[in-house]
Each structure stands twice: as structure tokens, then as C-alpha cells.
Amino acid sequence: MTTKTAQTAPALVPLHSDRDCRAYLLIDEASRQAALVDPRFDLTRDYEAILKQRGVALRFVIDTHTHADHLSGGDRFRNLCGAKVIMSAATKSRVPDLKVKDGETLQLGGSSLRFIHTPGHTPDSMTIFDGKRVLTGDTLFIGGAARTDFMGGSSEQLFDSFRKLEALGDNIEVWPGHDYNGKESSTIGRERKTNKAFMQPTKADLVAMLAMKGELPANMAEILSFNSERGLTEPEIIAPRDVAKLGRPGVDFTLLDSRYMDEWQAGRIAEAVHVPLPEVRDRWPEIARLKHPIVSVCRSGVRATYVMMTARHAGDKGWYLLEGGMQAWKKAGLPMVCDGGGEPAVITSRFATGGSCAAGGGGACAANG
Ligand SMILES: [Fe+2]
């Protein structure tokens, strides 16, 4: 059985294997159809380039759960290329086109993807099984477990979910949604022998092990609004070169830069208004009075999207996201200024922090674009 299913398993391409949230591309080689798993909104154009380079058509975007630590790219890919967004039947998110139940399968060309409901980290967590490997999202990490202390998480449920994964067999590869220790993949067998959380003999033991509460991911309310209600529509997203079409900044519209002070000082658009993200809510009356439309700017577009979610909650309309942020602005060769007279630069702030999906800390995974 293993040999037969392995032959039809799709090819797996890890898309970013750093400490951040991981995404994967599954490709059915024969049909050149692809599914993206847990893509990040801010990396949409990078993924597009990879899809093009590999000559594959994106059919599905699969979110393994409602992410609280990054903006999902699913909604945007549906808007851009008609890919269907898939999540668990247990999700409360309004974003997916298709909600799949435990044991349900999906054809990706000649490859078959089976969804296994693996609640624990969140009630809507699921694992994707392609016959050769499991993409475990934030259910099972290499040598670790997902945190279960927020968003309706449950260590008891996680224990049962581990048993479902264990039943697949020792040879099945494990590809997690995060890894904080520089490891790429594992196997069920290796986790069964080395992963302390996976090895806990009873529910009570796992509950005791994961009892610690962690910090909530930064900007969780804005992220959940984006991932559970809806993302941004294409008319709300503006390319750097199109900003000039809005008229004169400061007169006809406002550029609002939400980066930290060190990033602002290193390089910015001359006419921009500066309100660092942590000050946005307190200074909302001031922001609401700015000349609209407002173009929301940060380094890569993540924080600027958070600001747009705050605007959405406040019922404030007439906002654009600068696609790709200051990174794209600089790449397009558009003018910038800086303090101190050197060459303007787009830097990563030393103040950037984030939350974590790993139990017991482990590391930050929030994209502070
Ligand atoms: Fe998560």
C-alpha cells in the first residue's frame, strides 16, 4: 500500500524554511496542477513567480487552520487566479470556498490529498496527508507541539490528534507549519521516539506538559479579522508606480507610514506622515482627520495591512495598501529621503517582535513586515 500511494504523491516544494511560518507547494507532476499550503499574504508575488517558473496552475490554497500569527494569502490568490480556498469544516472563517471534513479527499490532478481533522492547537486545525507525508500545520512540530492556550485550543484534543497521526505509520514524513530549530522534516517514527509531547502516555500528561500560557501573537485582532472575515480586494491594493495617479501627496491624498522610528529615519517617502503601528489605535482620531484616500505604507505590507484592518473596524473608508511596501518602492527606483544625509535604505527594525505558535515559547513567528 505504501508503495502504491507513494507513486501518486505530489511533489513537495518547501517555500520558506526559515524560522517564520512555513508554506509549501504541492505539485501533481502529470497534470501540472498545484496547491499552496499556508501561504503568506505578503509573499503573494514571490509565490506567483515560483508558480510561473515551475509552469504550474494553482488550483487550491489550503490553510491548515485559522492563523493568528500571519496574514493568509488564500483570499488574494482566489482574487488573482480563481484558486479555491480550502479549510476545515470546523472553521468559523468565512474565507474558504470549500470546508472539508475529517477523512475527506481532494483530487489534485492524479494526486489525492486526504484531510485529517487534528484539533488541539485550534478547533479547526487539520493535517494534509498525501500518502507519503503529512503537512501538520501547527499540530505537530519537529520535537515539539503546538501551543493550545488560545483560540479555543485543547491539549486533550491534541493528544487524540497525535494518535491519529501515529496511526499513519512510522515511515510517513512530517512537514510542519513552523520549525524553530532549523530542521526541515521528520518522520512519524522519529517523533514517536524523540518528541516529548508526542510521547506523553496520557492526556493528563500532555495537559500538564502544555499548561504554560504564552504571549498572544502580536496584532492578533487585525490578523484574525483578515483571515476570518475577508482580506483585501484588488482595488484596495496599489502598486508603487500607480501612487502618483492619486495626485499630490499631502494635498490630494495621504501616505501613512506605520514603521518603527529607526526604519523611518533610515529611508522614507518625503511627504509621508509617520504613525508607528503601536501608536495607531491611540492616535486614531488624528489619522481619521488626514486627507483621504490614505495609502498605508510599511516595509513589506504586513503592518500597513494591520492598519487597514483597524480602519475597517472603525468604518473608515478610502484606504489603499502600498503593495510590497517600501521594499517595492525602493526597488521601483522611486524617490526617498532619510535622516543623516546618507543613502536612504529600507531596514528591518531592531524593535520587530512577534508571537509564537509553539508551546513553551520556542520563538517568534509573526511577520512584522
Ligand atoms: Fe498557528
Image: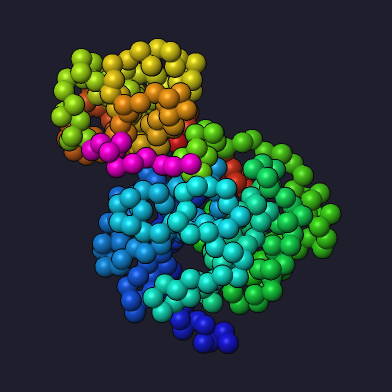
Task: Determine the residue positioned at 40% across, 30% down.
Answer: 308
Quarter holding the C terminus? top left
- Position of residue 320 measured from the top left corner of the image (x, y, whole percent): 30, 31
Task: Determine the residue positioned at 27% across, 38% down.
Answer: 235
In the displayed structure, 131 sits above or below 185; it is: below
- Position of residue 327 measured from the top left corner of the image (x, y, whole percent): 29, 37
Question: Within the magenta stretch, is there residue 303?
Answer: no
Res 1 → quadrant: bottom right
In the displayed structure, 4 sits above or below 154; it is: below
Q: Nearer the viewer, residue 305 or 216?
A: 305
Task: Determine the residue positioned at 70% across, 63% down.
Answer: 162
Q: Nearer the viewer, residue 360 or 112?
A: 112
In the displayed structure, 5 sits above or below 324; it is: below
Residue 368 shows in the view: yes
In the displayed structure, 264 sits above or below 202; it is: above
125 sits left or right of 290 in the view: right
Residue 369 shows in the view: no
Task: Determine the residue positioned at 20% across, 15% down.
Answer: 251
Q: How many marks?
A: 0
- Position of residue 155 measured from the top left corner of the image (x, y, whole percent): 74, 52
Magenta range is 229-239
Question: Within the magenta stretch, is there residue 234?
Answer: yes
